[in-house]
Image: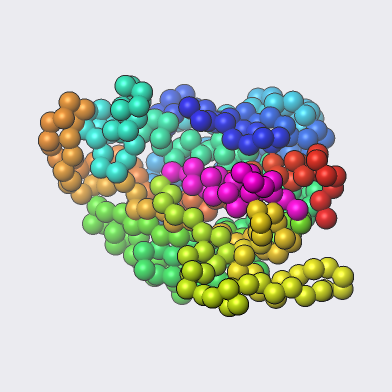
């Protein structure tokens, strides 16, 4: 089902939204890395539902359990299994959706592909699946930080038409976490929160853009031709629920420039090759160039809304649906740690691959 991701640092996620639990098996983690459930829990708490007035009110502690691969606080080099038990399911909210397809949701396509689906809470298509990714991402982040000094920070760049001005080179995690919308621009964050609350009160939803910066990424990560770094980053973040667009560096805006305007000219910084600008977004020829990696991901409005809409049943009958249940009016605040996790998984995997093929990265 495509539930495995990565090469040397490989993860397989499991579980459904209203099943017994969700989690991940991590294979390829180096041994002797100090890690604890408490460290992983920090990231899961940033992802969990019910954390603020602008997220789904589903109450889940999302407490993680490490089942294998860690002994006396250190990784063994063997598979690491992490599970989070589901506690606050209200499956009756989805009774109507057992036969009625939610517009723009995965209900109809899952039925078309498999001929069966878990309709309770969306089953495997629920964003609850990302718990395993975030847990694995916490470990990948620590490997990158300790081995190479890499720092990965994502934040909400835009919600609907409210766009923040943020400096990727200096933004801090404390600034991102200082507001429930995870936008480090104070003036914009207040407006974003007001807009999300307004849209929720209307029974509707909105989308936006998450930006992510990876600082301190070593030179040389990425494997052309088919495993270019930006290609793997694109696949990683676009595998997240509700994603509809990906940009790196100048992105689509770069198409408005000439080559002379867009090129990142080189200079020597005490013997280190640097670029004057960073329109490439830290990747050239599919390989990291040592500059900040900067990417943006578009998230659509949440598909499950309370407003009545036209749809069909699983036997083709035309009906209407006003969805019940507890859903985010805007996925972006909780998507921030998910984006960081996927970027960390890609960079960690490529870091280990580079070290295995060419030795330590510069």
Q: Position of residue 35 (x, y in %)?
A: 74, 38
Residue 227 falls inside the magenta stretch = yes
Residue 320 falls inside the magenta stretch = no
Query: Over which residues does the magenta segment extend?
Result: 220-241
Left or right, residue 358 beside residue 287: right
Q: Position of residue 165 (x, y in %)?
A: 51, 74
* Residue 341 shows up from this direction: no
Residue at x 80% of width, y 33% of height: 31
Quadrant for the C terminus in the image:
bottom right
* Residue 188 shows up from this direction: yes
Q: Position of residue 80 (x, y in %)?
A: 68, 28
Q: Position of residue 11 (x, y in %)?
A: 62, 33
Out of 87 and 111, give the one closest to the viewer: 111
Left or right, residue 273 beside residue 322: right
Residue at x 28% of width, y 33% of height: 108
All told, the count of numbered labels is: 0
Instruction: Return the residue found at the far top.
Output: 115
Residue at x 49% of width, y 47% of height: 238
Q: Quadrant of residue 53?
A: bottom left
């Amino acid at each position: 089902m495509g539930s495995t991701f990565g090469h040397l640092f490989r993860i397989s996620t499991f579980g459904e939204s209203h099943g017994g639990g969700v989690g991940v098996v991590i294979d390829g983690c180096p041994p002797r890395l100090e890690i604890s459930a408490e460290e992983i829990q920090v990231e899961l708490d940033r992802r969990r539902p019910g954390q603020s007035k602008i997220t789904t009110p589903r109450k889940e502690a999302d407490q993680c359990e490490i089942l294998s691969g860690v002994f006396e606080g250190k990784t063994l080099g063997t598979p690491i299994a992490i599970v989070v038990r589901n506690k606050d399911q209200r499956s009756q909210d989805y009774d109507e959706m057992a036969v009625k397809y939610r517009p723009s949701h995965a209900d109809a396509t899952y039925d078309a592909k498999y001929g069966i689906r878990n309709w309770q809470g969306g089953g495997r298509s629920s964003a609850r699946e990302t718990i395993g990714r975030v847990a694995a991402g916490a470990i990948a982040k620590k490997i990158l930080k300790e081995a190479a000094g890499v720092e990965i920070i994502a934040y909400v760049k835009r919600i609907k038409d409210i766009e923040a001005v943020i400096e990727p080179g200096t933004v801090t995690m404390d600034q991102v976490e200082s507001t429930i919308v995870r936008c480090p621009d104070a003036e914009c964050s207040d407006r974003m929160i007001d807009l999300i609350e307004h849209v929720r009160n209307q029974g509707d939803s909105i989308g936006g853009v998450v930006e992510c910066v990876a600082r301190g990424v070593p030179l040389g990560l990425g494997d052309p031709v088919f495993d270019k770094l930006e290609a793997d980053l694109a696949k990683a973040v676009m595998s997240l629920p509700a994603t509809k667009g990906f940009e790196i560096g100048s992105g689509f805006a770069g198409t408005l420039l000439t080559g002379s305007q867009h090129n990142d000219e080189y200079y020597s910084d005490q013997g280190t090759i640097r670029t004057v600008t960073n329109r490439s977004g830290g990747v050239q020829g599919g390989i990291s160039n040592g500059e900040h990696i900067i990417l943006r991901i578009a998230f659509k409005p949440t598909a499950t809304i309370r407003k009545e809409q036209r749809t069909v049943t699983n036997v083709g009958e035309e009906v209407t649906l006003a969805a019940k249940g507890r859903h985010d009016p805007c996925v972006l605040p909780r998507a921030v740690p998910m984006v960081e996790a996927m970027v960390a998984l890609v960079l960690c995997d490529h870091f280990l691959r580079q070290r295995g093929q060419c030795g330590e990265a510069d």
